[in-house]
Image (tube, helix red, strand yellow):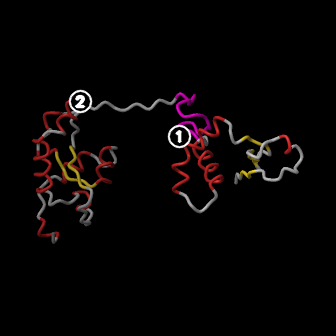
Amino acid sequence: MITIEKKRKRSDRGAANKPPGHLFCQLCVQEYPLDLLFLSRAVRSSDSFVRTVTNTSSTLQRVLFLYLKFMLKACSRCGKIHKPGECTAGIKYTQKIRDSEADRFRNRKIWRRKADEILERDGHCCRVCLSAGVINSTDLSVHHIVPLKVDYDRRLDNDNLITLCRYHHEAAERGRISRQELATMTCTVDFSRHNI
């Protein structure tokens, strides 16, 4: 922990030549005058922070504020310590621009109506969970069995749409659940048999 003490004894070696307004850092064992320009500016900017903390001395509060304010942090990209924005790892994060025809379709009212219709058809339950005997009605979404990129003309076809939970939707997107298996589950289910 960093602590700074104000020198009060003038009998210390060399203290006779220095004004009483010096700070002594116990970490680096150096003296710093209180009237330095950068320190006075930093202390003035820390005054708003100092007013909120009342348990410690004002000098320690200011030092802690300055330490936290100018402390270097590890880079989230490369893990090294350097100033923000100076990462040399060369990792560039790009945001996917979503302006394809399929993305525009998902924002239309006709798709929202169709998704509600499919949710009603499937009884607001994940069809894959239901085939395993589990009733799951959380985190549901409507999935295109044949993706819009492959066959855009089947975007509103009832046989191409199925209600899935988040887990099974991700599994279907990654190909862990085949399209044929999903297509067999789109048939109408008698929900009275499942006590829903």
User: Residue, x 74% and y 46% (percent of image)?
Assistant: 23
Residue 132 x/y as whole percent: 27, 63
Residue 46 x/y as whole percent: 56, 46
Q: Which amino acid, mark 1?
A: Ser
Indicate which disc, 1 or 2, sits on the residue closer to the N terminus: 1
Vertical position of residue 57 compared to residue 112: above or below: below
Q: Which amino acid, mark 2?
A: Ser
What predominant SS class does the magenta segment belong to? loop
Residue at far bottom of view: 195
Q: Tag count in the figure? A: 2
User: Residue, x 73% and y 45% (percent of image)?
Assistant: 21
Q: What residue is disc 2 on? A: 100
Vertical position of residue 47 compared to residue 188: above or below: above
Look at the image and tell me in which quarter the N terminus lies.
bottom right
Between residues 130 and 74, which one lies in front from this camera angle?
Answer: 74
User: Residue, x 64% and y 34% (percent of image)?
Assistant: 37
Q: Secondary structure at mark 1?
A: loop
Look at the image and tell me in which quarter the C terminus lies.
bottom left
The disc placed on residue 76 is 1
Residue 51 x/y as whole percent: 53, 54
Q: Secondary structure at mark 2?
A: loop
Please check the rendered image and state whether residue 52 is part of the magenta-colored stretch, yes or no: no
Of labels 1 and 2, the one closer to you: 1
Between residues 188 and 152, which one lies in front from this camera angle?
Answer: 152
Q: Which residues are magenta?
A: 74-90
Mark 1: give few (<14), some (14-19) or many (20+) Cα within 10 Å.
few
Q: Is residue 6 left or right of residue 196?
A: right
Please check the rendered image and state whether residue 87 is part of the magenta-colored stretch, yes or no: yes
Vertical position of residue 103 compared to residue 69: above or below: above
Residue 29 x/y as whole percent: 80, 46
Mark 2: give few (<14), some (14-19) or many (20+) Cα within 10 Å.
few
